[in-house]
Image (cartoon, rainbow, N blue to C red):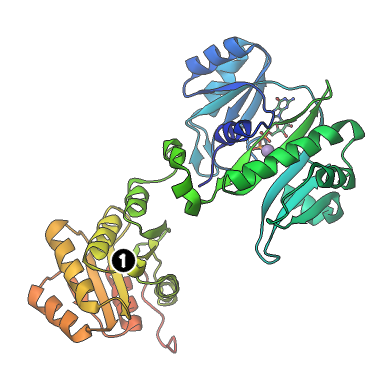
């Protein structure tokens, strides 16, 4: 789960990382009230899960109530890279002397945590990495060792942070590592980490990605408002334990196992269609799991046909068949279902499907013929002949 800036700053604050005082505002009036309480000048900041808000016009300094009204009015409702701005963060403005960069994330290839610090902050770190890779100081951290203040002092010195910022930055890095580990984050990033004109070091932006697999340790995460970034069907899928990712196309996909689900998405593209989603029912491809999966896909208005691709290994095909029949009883599934079942108890499964005599279900024997049929039903451009599969 990605947090927006203000949620990230609230997360940082729990670990003692210095941030500026601020308040959320969902309307222009709330923004103005917040600014009055905070005192001018303030910064009006769009709260969306995208980077580069400053360049896109979503971050504005305001010296008066009139300016807050103007900026809040412009930014609320603004479309930022496909995300509509519904909430603002009004923050007391900081007098910046220097902007730096600091982060912890997991380096999967090294199987270690990675700290990155740069004296070139405030701009895209990817840009720094490509233009001037030496400007980023890196340090791998073994989770069994953790970090020490001494190691962080060395790191910020190596990154070339100004001497008067080093102690404050090293202290923040120690706390940031705590936040990353204790807070179960996959990424904590401060860009910019600033040195103020008064010589204080503080986080002026926050990017935090929480590790969803650690949610069981954090009942408080349930309270985090994900800002309407997930749809009803994503929430339903999550509550049913399904791994669901919406995509742009029109063929709804249900498969068991991430590998088979990905191959199914690929095959739909290969025959000229496009998948509306990735959905792995996993080991839950039993009656209830199938019914829930169909329910989730059915909520997607762009779905025009559903391709169910199940290989029965541990999962039994007859259970899957019962699940589909049950789902058709329970929910009014709007699209036709193209079904490819193979593996354990497939004969019994075919009997169940035949007995149901549902016009909604079309059985196909192979994955390729099923993909073609589903794409045809979705009305996508016809497949090119002779794909060789
Ligand atoms: P991003 O563009 O989405 O990364 O948003 P940031 O929160 O990082 O803000 C972008 C830039 O706005 C920063 O790099 C700063 O230069 C500027 N900025 C943000 N907050 C303040 C502030 O309190 N005072 C000043 N002077 N500039 C700010
Ligand atoms: Mn930033």
In terms of depth relative to the viewer, which is nearer, 7 or 27? 7
Q: Using residue 334 as the reference point, say whether residue 210 is left or right of it.
A: right
Q: Measuring from the top left, give residue 39's x and y in whole percent.
A: 64, 11
| Residue 123 visible in the displayed image | no
Q: Using residue 233 as the reference point, say whether residue 109 is left or right of it.
A: right
Q: Residue at x 59, y 44 (%)?
A: 182
Secondary structure under tag 1 reads helix
The quarter of the image holding the C terminus is: bottom left
Q: Quadrant of residue 60?
A: top right
Q: Residue at x 40, y 85 (%)?
A: 385
Q: Residue at x 21, y 66 (%)?
A: 287
Which residue is identified by label 1?
284
Q: Using residue 45 as the reference point, say whether residue 135 is left or right of it.
A: right
| Residue 283 visible in the displayed image | yes
Q: Measuring from the top left, give residue 346's x and y in whole percent.
A: 22, 84
Q: Say above or below: 327 vs 90.
A: below
Q: Measuring from the top left, give residue 218's x and y in whole percent.
A: 47, 43
In terms of depth relative to the viewer, which is nearer, 132 or 274? 132
Q: Quadrant of residue 178?
A: top right
Find ligand 2 in the image and state its quadrant: top right
Q: Say above or below: 306 vs 117.
A: below
Q: Measuring from the top left, give residue 138's x and y in whole percent.
A: 80, 54
In terms of depth relative to the viewer, which is nearer, 311 or 67? 311
Q: Residues within 10 Å of mark 1 (few under 14, many from 20)?
A: some
């Amino acid at each position: 789960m990605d947090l927006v800036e203000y949620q990230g700053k609230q997360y940082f604050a729990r670990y003692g990382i210095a941030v500026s005082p601020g308040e959320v505002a969902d309307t222009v009036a709330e923004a103005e009230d917040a600014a009055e309480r905070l005192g001018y000048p303030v910064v009006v900041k769009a709260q969306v899960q995208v980077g580069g808000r400053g360049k896109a016009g979503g971050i504005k300094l305001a010296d008066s109530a009139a300016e807050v009204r103007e900026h809040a009015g412009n930014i609320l409702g603004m479309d930022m890279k496909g995300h509509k701005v519904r909430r603002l963060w009004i923050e007391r403005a900081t007098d910046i002397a220097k902007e730096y960069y600091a982060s912890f994330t997991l380096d999967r290839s090294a199987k270690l945590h990675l700290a990155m610090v740069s004296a070139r902050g405030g701009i895209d770190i990817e840009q720094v990495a490509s233009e001037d890779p030496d400007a980023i100081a890196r340090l791998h951290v073994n989770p069994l060792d953790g970090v020490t203040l001494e190691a962080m002092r060395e790191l910020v010195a190596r990154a070339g942070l100004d001497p008067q910022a080093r102690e404050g930055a090293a202290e923040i890095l120690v706390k940031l590592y705590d936040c990353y580990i204790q807070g179960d984050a996959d990424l904590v990033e401060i860009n910019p980490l600033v040195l103020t004109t008064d010589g204080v070091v503080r986080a002026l932006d926050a990017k935090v990605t929480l590790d969803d697999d650690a949610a069981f340790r954090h009942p408080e995460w349930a309270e985090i408002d994900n800002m309407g970034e997930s749809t009803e069907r994503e929430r339903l899928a999550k509550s049913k334990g399904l791994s669901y990712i919406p995509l742009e196309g029109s063929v709804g996909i249900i498969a068991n196992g991430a590998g088979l689900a990905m191959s199914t998405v690929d095959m739909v593209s290969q025959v000229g269609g496009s998948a509306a989603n990735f959905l792995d029912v996993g080991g839950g491809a039993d009656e209830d799991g199938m019914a829930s999966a169909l329910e989730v896909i059915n909520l997607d208005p762009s779905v025009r046909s559903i391709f169910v691709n199940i290989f029965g290994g541990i999962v039994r095909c007859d259970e899957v068949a019962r699940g589909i029949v049950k789902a058709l009883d329970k929910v009014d599934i709007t699209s036709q279902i193209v079904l490819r079942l193979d593996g354990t108890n497939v004969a019994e499964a075919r009997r169940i499907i035949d007995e149901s005599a549902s016009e909604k279900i079309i059985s196909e024997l192979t994955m390729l013929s099923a993909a073609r049929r589903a794409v045809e039903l979705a009305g996508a451009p016809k497949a090119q002949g002779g794909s060789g599969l």
